[in-house]
Image (cartoon, coloured by chain):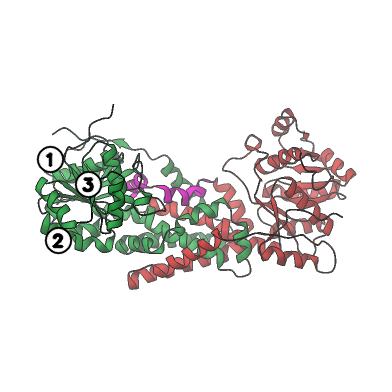
Chain colours: A red, B green
Amino acid sequence: MQRAPHSDLPVCVLGLGLIGGSILRALHRAGRTAYGWNRSAAAADDASAAGFDASSDLEATLRRADAGQHVIVLAVPVPALDPVLAAIAENAPNAWLTDAVSVKGDVARRVADAGLTARYAGGHPMAGTAFSGWDATDATLFDGATWVVTADDATPAPAWRLAASVGLDCGAVVVPAGSAEHDAAVARISHSVHVVAEAVAITAESDPAAKQLALTLAASSFRDVTRVAGTAPSLVNAMCEANRDALLDALDDTIAELIAARTELADSGTVRDVTERGYAARRAYDNARRTPVVPVLDGAGWQRALREAGHAGGVVTELPTT
Amino acid sequence: MQRAPHSDLPVCVLGLGLIGGSILRALHRAGRTAYGWNRSAAAADDASAAGFDASSDLEATLRRADAGQHVIVLAVPVPALDPVLAAIAENAPNAWLTDAVSVKGDVARRVADAGLTARYAGGHPMAGTAFSGWDATDATLFDGATWVVTADDATPAPAWRLAASVGLDCGAVVVPAGSAEHDAAVARISHSVHVVAEAVAITAESDPAAKQLALTLAASSFRDVTRVAGTAPSLVNAMCEANRDALLDALDDTIAELIAARTELADSGTVRDVTERGYAARRAYDNARRTPVVPVLDGAGWQRALREAGHAGGVVTELPTT
């Protein structure tokens, strides 16, 4: 028997691309009421034809979310954030708000500029594929994935609970984090990794005397490391540009490690130091453990306690009853 | 019906670890006579128990290869190369010689120091797994893989033909290349890729404020890029140290690309240049085509013509009849 959803409140998904459309499908699978909007009528029609409740009328969709004080999930591309937030401020100021964008500090600032901080907790599902658009959507995309829900000092408890309920109903485990810590972490495990993959792909080609042979011989290690260089440049740019400061720090650290390895090899003929530390770091990742925690969503400083729980490897798999 | 082997000459495999043991198994599968030697009696006994012709007596094994002018495949670790080459020079000067080591200039120099250049063509099967030892051997390890056979100016035609026959009988396609070009190419698609993966794994851990969260959130892009950082450091060191000069050039190019990306991001807030060129480079890899070529193994300058064919994407899948 299917378990009950983690909240009865209907969900309004704005943007029905890979992430937003998959959220709509996953919530439907979980038995939770959900409906969606997409700017292009074609995707909204496709979603409707597939049996989902979808519209291309933003104002009507937002008025519906406002009337029921539903929870809105922002899943539009970064360039569309500000106009959609303005529309929410005008037409759905009583709805709760979360998002599914891969940077959190930048979105929190835009939400604050729109005057919506008192209704908002940020979200970031750590899942995706190389494909995009409604045709690529998948109800199982988030199964077992991590889904960050931000707990900053200004985060309202009901917004955090509702954002977490969306992640859990999509099949993910929820990781509480501060926006700044989230952005620093993803700069190191995702954004800088994309930039490094681009540099590795370019390096394979940059010796004209060996370029064609390199492409002929490239095997699994090259294929794996450069796979994310096959992501559309516009998507990589949007992520990197929105997380500029944390990404600069991460790139500085990677560059420093490579220069140290180069120096070790030139001076002593070995790369022992970098390989031993790199091996240990990869083992730490392989051995990382997640500890289930029950979030406490009231009392002074609950946000800080929740951030610390996430910082220590805590994940939320159930919400306390209210 | 199984096709006939690409040569009737028996093969003597020295070293029955992952690569050498898999060569023994693959040649047996192809119906080619092959026998092996391993320094530790335990692995030789395991190979014998599995039905293969294996010994831990090096001198006797080499005298057998010498008597029949068989082809020897050197598949021992780099530190064992010089003593085993000295034993070959003493006990099997009439055998033909190839190898399965991942650098080629360094091995060619050691072969020359042992006085064996007139019997030698270098080899490098581009296959492997994270495992090692006889227990990890697999007759299908090289199926469809590329297998470099070096064609330097001093390479004798019979040695090239026999080395290529071993690769083909193991199920691989043979790529002709000069030793220097091979080493430059693998520095860029393998050795530097390992060093970069180590640096990425270290970077994920190097911000103490986000370290644990980074490990919790790391998803497929991080897992793929750092996978080779899980290789035993001693193996990575042995590859990198033996290909020092080409690896320094490759690391310099990767570091320069990352610094350029960092500068672009700091100065203009975008990483458009590196992402567009990285995407194009990865597409070039995805679209690289291999063209079958028939090797011509006589006439002045046949080695150079063969190198140029490999440089242009040519691969050898059949040997001409003699």
Measured along the vertical axis of the image, is residue B137 above or below residue B200? above
The answer to which image quadrant residue A134 occupies is: top right
Q: Range of the magenta residues?
A: A209-231
Look at label 1 and name its amino acid.
Asp
Position of the N terminus of chain B by quadrant = top left
Look at label 2 and name its amino acid.
Ala
For disc 1, the chain is: B
Position of the C terminus of chain B by quadrant = top left
Same subunit, tags 2 and 3: yes
Which sits in the foreground, B264 or B136? B136
For disc 3, the chain is: B
Residue that carries the numbered disc 2 in the rendered image: B114
Residue that carries the numbered disc 1 in the rendered image: B298
Question: What residue do we see at 50% from left, 59% from top?
Answer: B261
Q: Position of residue B44 (x, y in %)?
A: 27, 53
Measured along the vertical axis of the image, is residue A253 above or below residue B23? below
